[in-house]
Image (cartoon, rainbow, N blue to C red):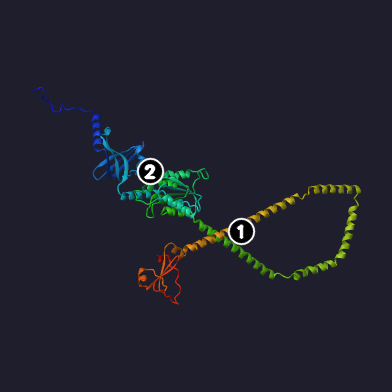
Amino acid sequence: MDLLDDPQPGQNMPEFTVSEISGEVKRALESSFGRIRVRGEVGRVFQARSGHLYYDIKDDRNVLACTTWKGQVATLSVVPEEGLEVVVTGRLTAFGAQSKYNLNVDEVAVAGQGALMALLEKRKKALESEGLFAPEHKLPLPYLPQIIGVITSPQGAVIRDILHRLRDRFPRKVLIWPVAVQGANCAPEVARAIDGFNRLTPGGALPRPDLLIVARGGGSIEDLWGFNEEIVARAAAASQIPLISAVGHETDTTLIDFVSDRRAPTPTAAAEMAVPVRLELLAWTGEQGARLSRAASDAVQRRAQRLRDLSRALPTGESLFSVPRQRFDRVADKLDSALVTGVQRRRLRLTELSAPLRPTSLRALVTARRDRLAHLGSRLSPRALDREIAAQGDRLTRLSDRLQAAQTTRVDRLRQRLDATDRLRETLGYKATLARGYAVVRDDQGTLLTTRAEAAKATALQIEFADGTLDTGAAPVRSASKPKQKPPEQGSLF
């Protein structure tokens, strides 16, 4: 037998340990695939006590185990849920202790709008079952908030539209909490902003708002997905400050719209819900003041008329005093005899009472009465009366000053209303439209022309500008019986 012959095939092959094989397999997987994207349906989902997330991605034939570590879970824009079709991104690796390979996922995205809508509907039903959409949980909006908190991006047209609309309607103090309005940071930042505003102290150095507005412009469902996250919906439902949701345009719907106290179709509409129109309030108060004055005047006139009517039903002075005068005459006739009888009766009584009296007791009684009179006299003083007179005089002066100030304020307010009405009249008139470059066209009969076809049929045209009238073609002939044309509407100008 040849010494070089291998008596048993395979004895010259190298031997590996289990750890070496596992390490080689792991390095081969990581070097061959690197960072990959996988699409599939989420299967079993399990979150360990350590915070790591374990789940499966599957199709109709195979299953891929996936792992997202605790530090990566917070950065996920979408948390995997069983039955959700997603696209995951990560690195393929192996776990030698169990001879398994898995995908370390650091990014999860929903695969398709249909899956997003299904996830949204699932979350909506779950929150609705908890009562977060119930009308009795909605807070009423303050009629005129002093401070308004706005949660939105500091860049873009949304915040400018809100501030501009508030300035036009009723200027208020605005606190802006800048947040990301899309992407992975959107949901946690919006939730922290709502909670942060609620934690402020009313009347503190940074006062707590009376009303919150969460706003964002329109976009796709993916762009608005941050406002569909459960953390945002629960933060809005737990807010003790009334909240208006103004996310997207009128056709866009997110979860925050259902839990907010009021939904606005646009950010501008949210500003209109937040405050009333200042000029309308001034007009309303002026109208109410006029109604109050008229009502008071009418009430006084009605009572005066009622007093006159009642006075005519009263008897005359002669009829009122005729019976008492007769009684007085009868009593006067009996007065002389009654005086004599009374004097005699009192003299007898005086005689009976004076019998036991002595000069000493009389002097003591007189002295006691004199002392008491002196004591009471010392307590009498005009100072209290003087103070009362002075206080009433001061009160009269204050009332006179208030009356004068109220009259001055009312005259100024009426003057401002008159000026505003005059400016509105000038603005609504068609003359102001002519000054902006428009013109009014009439034919030779003075009829208003609004279309090119009508102008082409006319033999002559009369064009009215802001500074005068220009005639083209033959001189216009106006009918004596034709009524004067009304000033044209804005749609008749060109």
Residue situated in front as seen by the camera: 210 or 277 = 277
Question: If the image is split into quadrants, where does the C terminus sit?
Answer: bottom left
Q: Earlier in the sequence, mark 1 or mark 2?
A: 2
| Callout 1 secondary element | helix
Residue 304 relative to residue 433: left or right: right
Q: Position of residue 131 (x, y in %)?
A: 42, 49
Q: Position of residue 57 (x, y in %)?
A: 28, 42
Asked if residue 274 shows in the view, the reply is no
User: How many neighbours does mark 1 have within 10 angstroms: few (below 14), some (14-19), or many (20 or more)?
Assistant: few
Asked if residue 110 shows in the view, the reply is yes
Q: Amino acid at mark 1?
A: Gln
Residue situated in front as seen by the camera: 120 or 129 = 120
Identify the residue position indicated by label 1 in the image.
407
* 377 versus 465 height, above or below: above
Label ID, residue 185:
2
Residue 76 relative to residue 21: left or right: right
Q: Amino acid at mark 2?
A: Asn
| Mark 1 and mark 2: Cα distance apart in space | 58 Å
* Number of disc labels: 2
Residue situated in front as seen by the camera: 405 or 337 = 405
x 25%, y 31%: residue: 23
| Callout 2 secondary element | loop
Q: Position of residue 25 (x, y in %)?
A: 23, 33
Label ID, residue 492:
none
